[in-house]
Amino acid sequence: MNDAPITDSMPSEDEIREALRPVIDPELRRSIVDLGMVRSVEIKADGVVDIVISLTTPGCPIRGHFQQAVAESATALPGVQVVNVGFDVLSEDEKGELRTKLGRGALPQGALAQVHNVICVGSGKGGVGKSTMTANLAAALALEGHRVAVVDCDVYGYSIPRMLGVHDRPKVNDQRKILPLEAAGGVKVMSIGFFIEKNAAVVWRGAMLHKAIQQFLEDVEWGELDYLLLDLPPGTGDVSMTLAQLLPQSKFVIVTTPQPAAQTVAKRSAEMSKKVNIEVLGVIENMSGFTTPGGERFAIFGEGGGQQLADELDVPLLGKAPISEPLRVHADEGTPLVVADPDDPAAQAIRQAARGIVAMTPRELPVFQEAAEPLGFELPVVTQHAPVIRTGG
Ligand SMILES: Nc1ncnc2c1ncn2[C@@H]1O[C@H](COP(=O)(O)OP(=O)(O)OP(=O)(O)O)[C@@H](O)[C@H]1O
Ligand SMILES: [Mg+2]
């Protein structure tokens, strides 16, 4: 507050704060008053009010929304003529308080403390070969002596169990932790497919989806891993946000086909990962050309999209996997091509990409020390040690 003369007809600071209650942070879905984001309210002479709003990040894209909503709410009060809205940024301590208030954070300390690298394999687009790449990259990394696990984050269209040839129902240990299944080569696997009846149509509500993925990360006995790969569903939506929230230090590998349309969509998912501060490690181009047994090459899905995307993002092109019937057949049979026929050209390309990933993750840091930035949605509270994920309504 300052010493400027205040006319009787002006509302008090408390009244102004109260008037700001309907201003909702669209990401956190709560009133900015409850969130402690109204830094200051200063009532000046001549009906002028200065209000400072504290944002979670300096470049907050919803600044304009706050500016307008705060000004409108305050000017609606009798006596208020002009509202100046300023912005600052919450301190680290304040952000911590906000996280506590929202009851959200990263995974509990130590949940994945022995996991050195988390790599999300994604693409905005469906059907470009994310799951095929994930399964084969995991097998390739295991072949090179790394301890590897895969989480199938595609709860609607899970395909990892089939591609890695694992189908049992996971067991639960004495500590009520779920034991992942093991595929050939020692790759540990967790998928929603292990818990639901074959071909059952599962309707997932958003909250359940977050919960399932959180449980896969938290309630599964992963042990020590060099690489935890996450096979993302198509799209840039909820799952990516959940992962960014839970695994702030994970890295992203983008799969794209050579055609410009796929690349544009893939770029969107790269932008999304940038927005949530996840580093893009590199690009894998899949389905890049088909070579006949006679050696003639056809660029069925065009040419160059992977390299172009990699250049635009300023990250390496980790590999180019050709269209390959053996790659598809082995994925269908649950025997990844990189293991079944390591010298096949598609297998070689994926093995090269795996080596690129290793080269780009030289530091073996545990990934779960810091709490994540608040991200704009609420994760449900997860019942600890729930051994089975319930599905359906
Ligand atoms: N390089 C390739 N050559 C031949 N077939 C391929 C290749 N890559 C993937 N496939 C096949 O294309 C289909 C789609 O691949 P996949 O399921 O890996 O894609 P996805 O991106 O994970 O799809 P979704 O978006 O549905 O999760 C599968 O049948 C797979 O076997
Ligand atoms: Mg898939």
Image (cartoon, grey):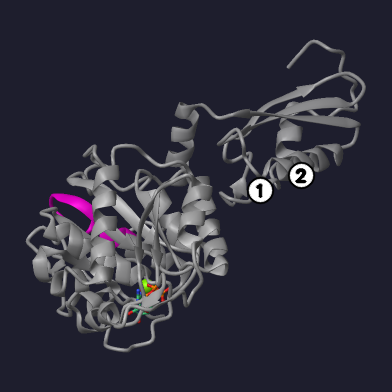
x then y, percent, for residue 364: 21, 39
Q: Which amino acid, mark 2?
A: Ala
Q: How many marks?
A: 2
Of residues 289 and 253, which is closer to you in this image? 289
Crowd tier of the residue under label 1, counting other residues whose Cα lies within 10 Å: few below 14, some 14–19, many 20 or above: some
x then y, percent, for residue 256: 45, 64
Q: Is residue 195 visible?
A: no
Alpha carbon of mark 1 to alpha carbon of mark 2: how far? 9 Å
Q: Secondary structure at mark 1?
A: strand
Q: Mark 2 — residue?
A: 69
Q: Which residues are magenta?
A: 214-228
Of residues 93 and 124, which is closer to you in this image? 124
Considering the image in quadrants, where does the C terminus appear?
bottom left
Q: Determine whether 169 is above or below 79 in the image.
A: below
In percent of the image, x 22 and y 59: which residue is there?
Answer: 219
x then y, percent, for residue 274: 50, 46
